[in-house]
Image: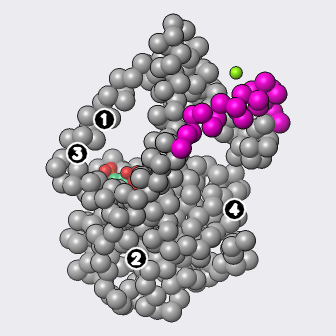
Amino acid sequence: FMQMFYENDANLHILAEKTVAVVGYGSQGHAQAQNLRDSGVRVIIAQRNGKSADKAREDGFTVVSVAEAAQTADILQILLPDESQARVYKEEIEPYLRSGQTLMFSHGFNIHFQQIKPPTFVDVVLAAPKGPGHLVRRVYEGGAGVPALIAVAQDASGHARETALAYAKGIGATRAGVLETTFKEETETDLFGEQAVLCGGVSALVKAGFETLVDAGYQPEIAFFECCHELKLIVDLIYEGGLERMHDSISDTAEYGDYTAGPKIVTDETRRAMKAILKDIQTGVFARNWILENQAGRPSFSAMRRIDAEHPLEQVGKELRGMMSFIAK
Ligand code: NDP
Ligand code: MG
Ligand code: MG
């Protein structure tokens, strides 16, 4: 087993004399900043003016420009969208960097694919929670934590790893467990996981199942419940106790169907597609496409987003969720 770090392996006192600037107050930014503050760390928010800046002020934070944070903070955790990080870094961070500072990321994309090339005199580390921002906050408030990965790309100070670990403790991750990785491994596995399984794989599977039932004449509402809504209940069981717990809870009929049908859905062809997706990530083809897509103003991204929003699954889902008062809006 690989080494895991827990509460006693990380020292929050390392951050005692330091100011952490959380750059970007979005999904991860709002969660990490509030967790750090509750852990006793001095935190400021670096944000351009607008909705997120207002939200940070409402939440009681001091909000400064990114350039000011780059000049004053000891640790800069870059939580801007991956596709704007390189430009903001070049214009508002790089000119002010000095020795002793730590550049931190929650995803390795821009360092690994060399969109950001920091000077050798700063530490460059990763502290990446393995969960959506809103859960990073909610789970922390409940006394627990979302696991995280740490990595060191540059260790100018000789303390880069301790800094990353202390930060991970501050956001609550050592309560769950922190694993050490590299920027390369985090970037490639993160992209693969979201594309092949968590987001791409699941979305396509749900839509295909829904369409199969509706095309066969079944009611869309029933198809929605069977192929989409129940997914959360199944995933919750897997999260709690693995496939075994899920298999214990479902009927033996469902379990038999699981073993017999699953391999017909994820076939050798599917595995070949997964390998091809991984190859495109490893060779930088995916990164190049995504960077070019952004430079072109996101034409395909916007089109695909619109097509997905118009999918009957989404229309039916919206109506049915509207009837379920216990689902947060
Ligand atoms: P969001 O899109 O949720 O938030 C980005 C924030 O940056 C917003 O508050 C936005 O504020 C601000 N922002 C956007 N553009 C600029 C700009 N040009 N200048 C200054 N501020 C800007 O990002 P995420 O939290 O999703 O992602 C942040 C990082 O965390 C990424 O590296 C991502 O890969 C990583 N990550 C994200 C996870 C998640 O749960 N979402 C999970 C794990 C890692 P506004 O536009 O209002 O000004
Ligand atoms: Mg990701
Ligand atoms: Mg059933």
Q: Residues within 10 Å of mark 2 (few under 14, many from 20)?
A: many
Residue beneath the point at 51% across and 7% down? 217
In the image, 171 versus 197, the foreground residue is 197
Residue beneath the point at 66% across and 39% down? 235
Q: Amino acid at mark 1?
A: Met
Q: Which dot marks residue 103?
A: 2
Q: Position of residue 134 (x, y in %)?
A: 53, 48
Q: Residue furthest left?
A: 296
Q: Position of residue 161 (x, y in %)?
A: 55, 82
Vertical comparison of 107 with 71: above or below: above
Residue beneath the point at 59% across and 74% down? 180
Query: For residue 263, which quarter of the picture?
Result: top right
Q: Earlier in the sequence, mark 1 or mark 4?
A: 4
Vertical comparison of 316 with 186: above or below: above
Q: Residues within 10 Å of mark 1 (few under 14, many from 20)?
A: few
Whether the residue carrying mark 1 lies under 8 Å from ligand 2 is answered with no
Q: Residues within 10 Å of mark 4 (few under 14, many from 20)?
A: some
Report which residue position mark 1 lands on.
Answer: 304
Report which residue position mark 4 lands on.
Answer: 176
Q: Amino acid at mark 3?
A: Arg
Helix, strand or loop at disc 2?
A: strand
> Along the horizontal axis of the image, is 95 left or right of 79?
left
Q: What span is colored magenta in the figure?
A: 248-268
Q: CA distance from mark 4 to mark 3?
A: 37 Å
Mark yes or no: residue 19 visible: no
Q: Is residue 164 magenta?
A: no
Report which residue position mark 3 lands on.
Answer: 298
> Along the horizontal axis of the image, is 108 left or right of 162?
left
